Amino acid sequence: MKKNTIKKILLLVTTTLSVFFLAACGNSQASSTKEKTVKIGITGSDDRVLNLVAKKVKKEGINLKIVEFSDYNQPNTALQQGEIDLNAFQTITFQNDWNKKHHSNIVSIGSTVIAPMALYSKKITSLEQFKDGDKIAVPNDATNEGRALQLLESAGLIKLNSAKIPNVKDITENKLNLKISALDAAQTAKSLDDVTASVVNSGVASDAKLNPKKAVYREKITAKSKPYVNIISANAKDKNNATYKKIVKAYQSKDVAKEIKKEFGGYESPAWNYKVLN
């Protein structure tokens, strides 16, 4: 075989291998930078803040997809069943109660906001205006009902026994014979035409455009409020997931804190640096 022919063959083989190697490297690089999709479940209007978080983590190759649910039972069920990867809607107390009742193992991977409950009314403007037999609506899920009743107690309207998570049966004193009824949390704001007052979660109040400055009474935030801090939750097996930790870090940032105050001024405050809870 002539030398020129051998050189041509070797050149062709070398070129082919080089192209193959570069293509392989290109595929490897594309694979390593492939965007990861993370589904996070919410209720209410938290998406305004999470949209900012989504923009922040997009730069790190994370596609944060927000999945909305209509009530407080759905996000944990969806998380357990693997339909979503995270959720951001519940308090520590709600999560603990859910785990106990559903034999699940959902854990907190980071705090988000502290959201005081408030007592709203279209009929009265102060606690002194309550009359005998007036109606008050409270959320009907166990933890929020208990929290609402504790709010009514702190307002001086009722007295409770020492139950950790009280319900209406734990009321020991009700001098005004207030008629307290439990409704789905999402219905508490809508019930204001039918009751004297209603205890409403901050997210529901925000969606209903209720003004927290005009609330009849607001929950006081103290060191005892820590169980009511809202959290980002994951299944226990994912508590150390590096991608999820990046999402928490993006949430717990100065610009997100600023956005929370802007969007939810009066309803919610950043909780990861809330001094009274440390």
Image: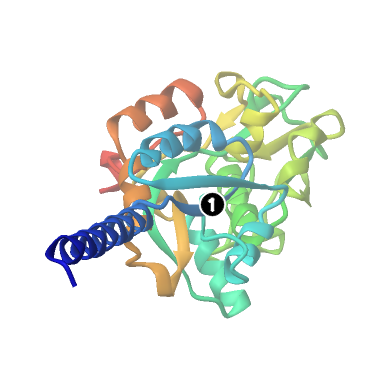
Display coloring: rainbow
Residue at image location 32% in from the left, 53% down from the top = 26
Residue 13: name its quadrant. bottom left
Give the residue at mark 1: 40
Q: Is residue 177 visible?
A: no
Q: Is residue 106 visible?
A: yes
The single residue placed furthest to the right in the displayed view is 194
Rendering coords of residue 155 (x, y %): 56, 38
Left or right of 230: which side holds 272? left
Residue at image location 67% in from the left, 20% down from the top = 125
Left or right of 175: which side holds 62? left
Left or right of 44: which side holds 224? left
Rendering coords of residue 6 (x, y %): 18, 67
The number of discs equals 1
Q: Which quadrant: the N terminus?
A: bottom left
Rendering coords of residue 94 (x, y %): 55, 60
The single residue placed furthest to the front in the displayed view is 2
Q: For mark 1, give the secondary structure.
A: strand
Of 73 and 147, the residue lying toward us: 73
Q: Amino acid at mark 1?
A: Ile
Residue at image location 32% in from the left, 67% down from the top = 240
Relative height, residue 120 to residue 243 (above, below): above
Relative height, residue 201 to residue 240 (above, below): above
Relative height, residue 73 to residue 230 (above, below): below
Residue 256: name its quadrant. top left
Residue at image location 62% in from the left, 29% down from the top = 206
Left or right of 6: which side holds 272? right
Of 205 and 19, the residue lying toward us: 19
